């Protein structure tokens, strides 16, 4: 009988003992630190994103509260502004047209995202949903506060909303800033909230893209808010509160849901028909 080749056999006794200070599940030379656990990392990341989202919402709530408390100075400013602008032509066109242009920018961003992959599509879808939620939140606050409009009591304007269409906050401003925020987060890779937009979008954007996907939507939102005050249909504190609601709700929504939305889009794209709709390069 041929003796076994000792170079090819080993037993537990032959194996070197683990270095002192290490245990199973640790890497030698790492000072007893356990191997990283992906599930724990994911949980910590999700908790951090929720904390960021809550911070934005709490901040918006504080802005809304302070704006409401400043109604007196806001009314004085409103009277000073409307004395010069209440009959100014074009204010309503700016307010309504600005929102429509922002909707168009959102549509362009959604179309462009199809070329960028599942993460861009997911972020765009969530940002759009956040804008809808922002409008609903603004309407809920409006129904709760039930603040009369200045054009009901203080000044006469040509197109004053009917009684029951309350003033605080401004829905036009809320949806305008919500849409602008959606365009910035989904369409401007260079400007993003930490954790809100996938890291693959972190490269620096050319100046033209910054002008188109950051400066333009923000300018349009500001124009809508200003036009609502110039028309005499909103107080300045109405539009400040509306802007806070619009921005915070969209940022919070994208921060928390962009990751899960990317996973959902990736899974949905396994179906050929869905993939052809969501992605410009389905192969």
Image (cartoon, rainbow, N blue to C red):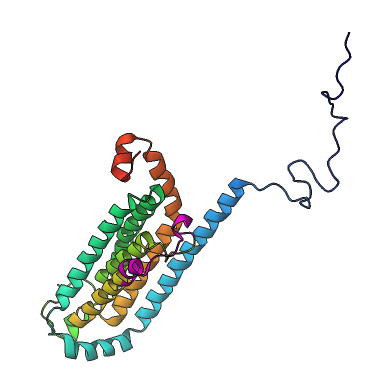
Q: Would residue 39 be found to the left or right of residue 34 on screen? A: left
User: Within the magenta stretch, is there residue 197?
Assistant: yes
In x, y percent, where is residue 228?
A: 22, 77
Which residue is at the front of the view, 131 or 31? 31
Residue at x 42% of width, y 61% of height? 252
User: Within the magenta stretch, is there residue 158?
Assistant: no
Q: Would residue 94 be found to the left or right of residue 19 on screen? A: left
Residue 127 picture quarter:
bottom left
- In this rendering, the answer to whether 226 lies above or below 164 is below
- The span picked out in magenta is 195-215
Counting every numbered tag in the picture gives 0
Q: Would residue 272 be found to the left or right of residue 156 on screen? A: right
Q: Would residue 165 be found to the left or right of residue 263 on screen? A: left
In x, y percent, where is residue 195?
A: 49, 59
Regarding residue 234, the answer to whether it shows in the image is: no
Residue at x 28% of width, y 59% of height? 106
Residue at x 36% of width, y 59% of height? 186
- In this rendering, the answer to whether 173 lies above or below 277 is below
Residue 91 picture quarter:
bottom left
Q: Quadrant of the C terminus?
A: top left
In x, y percent, where is residue 251?
A: 41, 63
Q: Quadrant of the N terminus?
A: top right
- In this rendering, the answer to whether 50 lies above or below 148 is above
Residue 68 picture quarter:
bottom left
Which residue is at the front of the view, 203 or 174? 203
Residue at x 34% of width, y 62% of height? 182
Regarding residue 56, the answer to whether it shows in the image is: yes
Which residue is at the front of the view, 180 or 256? 180
């Amino acid at each position: 009988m041929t003796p076994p080749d000792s170079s090819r056999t080993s037993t537990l006794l032959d194996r070197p003992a683990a270095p002192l200070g290490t245990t199973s599940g640790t890497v030698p030379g790492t000072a007893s630190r356990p191997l990283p656990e992906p599930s724990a990392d994911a949980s910590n990341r999700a908790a951090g994103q929720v904390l960021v989202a809550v911070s934005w919402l709490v901040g918006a709530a504080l802005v809304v509260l302070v704006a409401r408390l400043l109604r007196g100075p806001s009314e004085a400013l409103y009277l000073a502004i409307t004395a010069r602008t209440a009959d100014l032509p074009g204010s309503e066109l700016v307010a309504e047209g600005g929102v429509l242009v922002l909707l168009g920018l959102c549509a362009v961003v959604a179309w462009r995202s199809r070329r960028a992959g599942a993460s861009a599509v997911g972020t765009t879808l969530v940002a759009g949903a956040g804008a809808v939620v922002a409008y609903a939140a603004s309407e809920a606050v409006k129904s709760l506060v039930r603040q009369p409009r200045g054009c009901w009591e203080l000044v006469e304007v040509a197109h004053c909303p009917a009684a029951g269409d309350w003033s605080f906050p401004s829905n036009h401003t809320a949806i305008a800033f919500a849409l602008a925020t959606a365009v910035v987060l989904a369409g401007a890779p260079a400007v993003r909230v930490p954790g809100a937009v996938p890291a693959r979008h972190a490269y620096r954007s050319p100046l033209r893209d910054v002008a188109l996907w950051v400066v333009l939507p923000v300018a349009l939102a500001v124009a809508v808010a200003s036009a609502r005050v110039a028309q005499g249909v909103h107080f300045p504190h109405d539009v400040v509160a509306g802007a806070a609601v619009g921005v915070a709700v969209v940022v919070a929504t994208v921060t928390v849901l962009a990751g899960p939305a990317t996973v959902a889009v990736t899974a949905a794209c396994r179906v050929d028909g869905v993939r052809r709709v969501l992605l410009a390069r389905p192969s």
